[in-house]
Image (cartoon, helix red, strand yellow):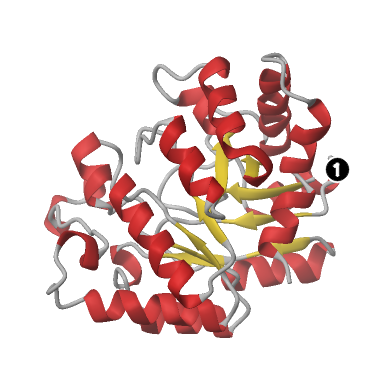
């Protein structure tokens, strides 16, 4: 098994365990590795240290929120040049996150203000950071890294896929597209999957997303087809240990009549092939 999305301490939000504790849990569960994600800092150095100390395939990356300068080519180049494999477009600082009233770094201190981020060419082609977005995409292509859509809107996800195709980016993951943000419908997800996008479903959705059910997640899984990726997105104190959370997701989807072997492949071979060279 290979979990493509997990959070650990230290973080600005409370987490169920520190990096080494999360890694030990995966090792005990027989996992081959995982992707360590943080919303407000690069995890490349942390992942490298874990890989050396545990022997697991631990992968890091960078999320393009305000703490790293937003859609910042310098931060992306630094992360990818030091071994990072994954670039997430804005999550906690996305304009969709603000509109949905979901947690943001600015919630911790009102002096930060409520500035939110978008993919500039979609909402404003003349935006001064449109050039930065293009360079970020070029860097992802040149490093054969994984482009994750983050929490941006459906139209922004579609634009990112168009831009990825134009650059020959083959590692493209829709970050939990059926989550509150971006809130895409199965028919939209199926269209993008048919064009080559991988589609993530997370245990967090099953455990915490208002109104989400196993039946609805099964619809998304069917829309994704062979591009399905199952991940935990765990690490919260009120979630199970990440490996257990992912097992719960697989069991819930299998309970909706989906093939258990296919689901396990979506939590192992498929994400490994997506992330690792």
User: Residue at (27%, 62%) from the top-left corner?
Assistant: 119
Tell how many labels. Answer: 1
Is residue 85 visible from the viewing direction of this image?
yes
**Quarter occupied by the N terminus:** top right
User: Residue at (33%, 45%) from the top-left corner?
Assistant: 154
In the image, 179 versus 35, the foreground residue is 179
> Residue 93, percent across and down?
28, 54
In the image, 203 versus 41, the foreground residue is 203
| 151 to 179, vertically: above or below | below
Q: Is residue 103 left or right of residue 81?
A: left
> Residue 249, percent across and down?
66, 27
Q: Is residue 29 left or right of residue 157?
A: right
> Residue 206, percent across and down?
54, 24
Kind of element beneath mark 1: helix
In the image, 27 versus 161, the foreground residue is 161
User: Residue at (39%, 20%) from the top-left corner?
Assistant: 210
Is residue 234 visible from the viewing direction of this image?
no
Q: Is residue 52 left or right of residue 84?
A: right
User: Residue at (64%, 42%) from the top-left corner?
Assistant: 228
Crowd around label 1: few <14 · some 14–19 · many ≥20 (10 Å) = few
In the image, 272 versus 39, the foreground residue is 272
Q: Which residue is mark 1?
A: 28
């Amino acid at each position: 098994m290979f979990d493509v999305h997990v959070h650990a301490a230290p973080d600005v939000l409370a987490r169920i365990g520190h990096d080494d504790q999360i890694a030990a849990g995966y090792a005990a569960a027989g996992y081959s590795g995982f992707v360590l994600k943080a919303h407000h800092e690069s995890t490349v150095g942390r992942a490298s240290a874990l890989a050396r100390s545990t022997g697991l395939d631990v992968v890091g990356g960078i999320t393009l929120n305000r703490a790293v300068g937003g859609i910042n080519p310098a931060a992306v180049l630094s992360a990818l040049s030091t071994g990072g494999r994954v670039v997430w477009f804005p999550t906690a600082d996305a304009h969709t996150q603000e509109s949905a009233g979901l947690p943001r770094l600015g919630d911790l201190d009102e002096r930060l203000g409520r500035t939110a981020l978008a993919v500039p060419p979609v909402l404003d082609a003349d935006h001064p950071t449109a050039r930065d977005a293009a360079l970020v995409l070029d860097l992802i292509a040149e490093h054969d890294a994984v482009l994750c859509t983050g929490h941006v809107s459906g139209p922004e996800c579609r634009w990112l896929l168009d831009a990825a195709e134009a650059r020959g980016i083959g590692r493209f993951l829709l970050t939990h597209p059926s989550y509150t943000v971006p809130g895409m419908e199965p028919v939209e997800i199926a269209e993008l999957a048919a064009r080559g996008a991988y589609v993530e479903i997370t245990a967090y959705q099953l455990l915490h997303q208002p109104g989400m059910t196993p039946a609805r997640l099964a619809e998304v899984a069917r829309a994704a087809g062979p591009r399905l990726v199952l991940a935990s997105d765990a690490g919260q104190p009120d979630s199970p240990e990440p490996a257990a959370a992912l097992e719960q997701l697989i069991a819930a989807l299998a309970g909706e009549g989906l093939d258990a072997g296919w689901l396990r492949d979506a939590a192992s071979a498929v994400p490994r092939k997506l992330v690792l060279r």
